[in-house]
Amino acid sequence: MDSATIDAAAAATSIQALCDQAIKHEVSLEQLETRLILSAMTKADNNVARAARLLGMTRPQLAYKLKKHQTE
């Protein structure tokens, strides 16, 4: 498995855990988005285009979110 491949079961479990935290107000939606973006960037070796593909968005969309989260 290469670095751009996500183990679907592990990803689903991790996402479910984060969603549960958000529902319980232990983590905000902004924090949830930040964690997902950082996880994708790590899996993509900090390659924005590959991370965007992992997240199902375009490179410009992810670049915008990265900039937005850096300024918060």
Image (tube, rainbow, N blue to C red):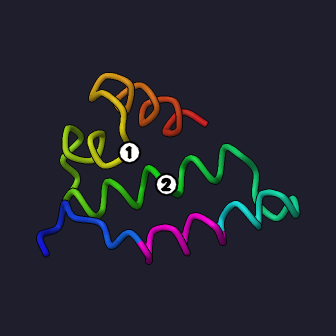
Check residue 38 in the rendering and tell me which mark sits there, or answer none: none
Element under disc 2: helix
Q: How crowded is the residue under tag 1: few (<14 C-alpha within 10 Å), some, or many (20+)?
A: some
Q: Could you tell me which residue is drawn at 53 percent across and 57 percent down?
A: 35
Q: Please, which residue is most extreme toward the left here?
A: 2
**Label 1–label 2 contact, CB within 8 A:** yes
Q: Main secondary structure of the magenta part?
A: helix
Look at discs 1 and 2 and give the one toward the viewer: 1
Element under disc 1: helix
Q: Could you tell me which residue is drawn at 30 percent across and 62 percent down?
A: 42
Q: Quadrant of the C terminus?
A: top right
Q: Would residue 25 be found to the left or right of residue 4 on screen? A: right
**Cα separation between marks 1 and 2:** 8 Å
Residue 15 in the image, given as x and y percentages of width and height: 57, 64
Q: Which residue is mark 2?
A: 36
Q: Would residue 42 be found to the left or right of residue 72 on screen? A: left
Q: Which residue is mark 1?
A: 55
The residue under label 1 is which amino acid type?
Leu
Q: How crowded is the residue under tag 2: few (<14 C-alpha within 10 Å), some, or many (20+)?
A: some
Q: Could you tell me which residue is drawn at 66 percent across and 43 percent down?
A: 30
Stretch of the chain drawn in magenta: 9-17
Residue 16 in the image, given as x and y percentages of width and height: 63, 67
Could you tell which of marks 1 and 2 lies nearer the N-terminus? 2
> Measured along the vertical axis of the image, is residue 54 above or below residue 64?
below
Residue 1 in the image, given as x and y percentages of width and height: 13, 75
Q: Please, which residue is most extreme toward the right here?
A: 24
Magenta segment includes 45:
no
Q: Could you tell me which residue is drawn at 63 percent across and 53 percent down?
A: 32
Q: Nearer the viewer, residue 53 or 70?
A: 53
The residue under label 2 is which amino acid type?
Leu
Q: Nearer the viewer, residue 8 or 20?
A: 8
Q: Would you identify the image quadrant in which residue 48 lies?
A: top left
